[in-house]
Amino acid sequence: MPLVNMMGSIQSGFGSVADSTQRKASASTIATCSGDTCDFGVYQSLGVCGACSSGSLPIDLSDGYYVLRTMDDVDLSLNAIEGQVNLTADGSYPVSSDLKEQVGPLLVRSVAFLRSRFANSTVVAKECAAWWCVKTYASTMTNGTLHEEMREERTDRSPGARTTGDSQQDSIDLYPPTCPINPSDQSAVPKSCDFFVGAESHRAIQNFFISNNPNLFSSPFFTGSVTMDWNTSNVTSLPVAALLEPSNFDGDIGAVFDEAFTSMLRYMTVSLRDQPTYGPDYPGWVYGKAFTRETAFEVNWAWLSYPIIVVAASIAFLALTIVLNRHDEIWKSSVLAIMFHSFADDDRRALGDLNTTQAMRAATRDQKVQMEKQDPGGQWVFRTRAGKPKTHAEAKKMVGSGASRIFGHGSEFAREFLSDRD
């Protein structure tokens, strides 16, 4: 008897065609990634492959029953009037020409008569086969999500790999031509891969499909029939019940059978991968490469040349201005220019050219200022008055200068100062 999870996978896989909302099988692969993205490369796993005949098998009508023309060893028929579905399975190799060239170590062959529920609908006979194979995968993991792709299926079609039904005594060994195992310790990589199925495991799964032993199963999985007057109470076969889903019978029932069989193989492969069996020299882990995203900047120096030139020219202009004006006082910090602008015209002309703050500061030393109206009703202006001289030299200078004509009071102070000294 096979493992319970394998039996459940077979039933769920075939029955999934009756429920479009059923979750699609996927392997419970344990994967960890230390970076933003991980690439696990290419690796292989034991699987179950299979196919169905592309068209209907040759059918003959004999004594009110449809029978298979080329399968004398198959005890299967369908009532020409009342029959709707009839299934059987065995361990014999398929006879369909398109299957003969594909099949490897056979697990099970299923043959079915199928007819839709519509009156006068065509009866089809399908042959499907399942065999052991090795599947090659490649996967990446991004942001915690594993993305796996099945790349290739390989099997052994040589005469020595043929199975012998329920009398199988030898393990089934599959040697793919490449061995893409990439453990961290490369010395552990074998020169050739050996994917094997034990004889007991093979017979256990095969018995679930075809055995009539009541001590093992109430009935073989791929056995069942139903007539046109069927109801849910007399349908005990799960495959037949899945095919009798109303939505399935509205379409091509042969295509539905193909889809159900393919889905069953996919579920079985998932079950094998969820509980892998490795030999002592075959590691169970696949190691990949982790990639971490880093921020990088690309500098286009041609585009940066213009702002660099502008900034450099501005700095040079500022430095040149500082050097050329290093001895000049800053007008902005002095109010002398504003005050001299408010002098009367004759006073301002008498003071001469005052182009620097030093000249203005010298002109204002010992000067007194008063505000006068130039004319009645005119604007107010500053008028200067010279202060008293402190030294004899200052008095002489004041008396002899043109300022005495403007700063009259100042010249009087100067004359008094000189007379007192004389």
Image (tube, rainbow, N blue to C red):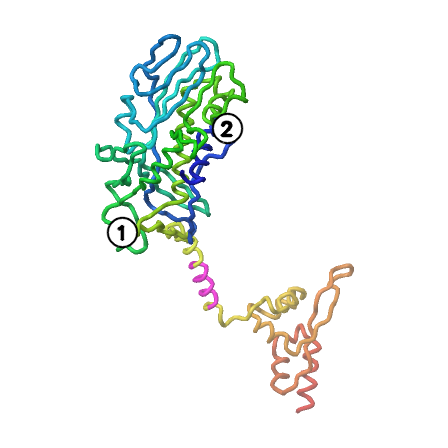
Give the camera-side residue of 247 and 410.
247
Q: Check residue 321 for magenta coloring.
A: yes
Neighbour tally class for label 1: few under 14, some 14-19, many 20 plus, Cα within 10 Å: some
Image spot of residue 103 (x, y percent): 28, 29
Image spot of residue 318 (x, y percent): 47, 63
Magenta segment main secondary structure? helix
Q: Which mark is residue 405?
A: none
* Image point (35%, 25%), residue name: 128
Provide the secondary structure element on which disc 1 rests. loop
* Image point (30%, 48%), residue name: 181
Image spot of residue 209 (x, y percent): 39, 30
**Distance from the alpha carbon under mark 2 to that under mark 1:** 42 Å
Identify the amino acid type marked 2.
Answer: Ser
Give the camera-side residue of 342 and 3.
3
The residue tagged 2 is 20
Identify the amino acid type marked 1.
Answer: Val
Give the camera-side residue of 19 and 372.
19
Provide the secondary structure element on which disc 2 rests. loop
Q: Which mark is residue 189?
A: 1
Image spot of residue 264 (x, y percent): 41, 31
Give the tally of numbered discs. Answer: 2
Magenta range = 312-322
Q: Residue furthest left?
A: 159
> Is 362 rendered above or below residue 171?
below
Neighbour tally class for label 2: few under 14, some 14-19, many 20 plus, Cα within 10 Å: few
Q: Check residue 266 for magenta coloring.
A: no
* Image point (47%, 26%), residue name: 237
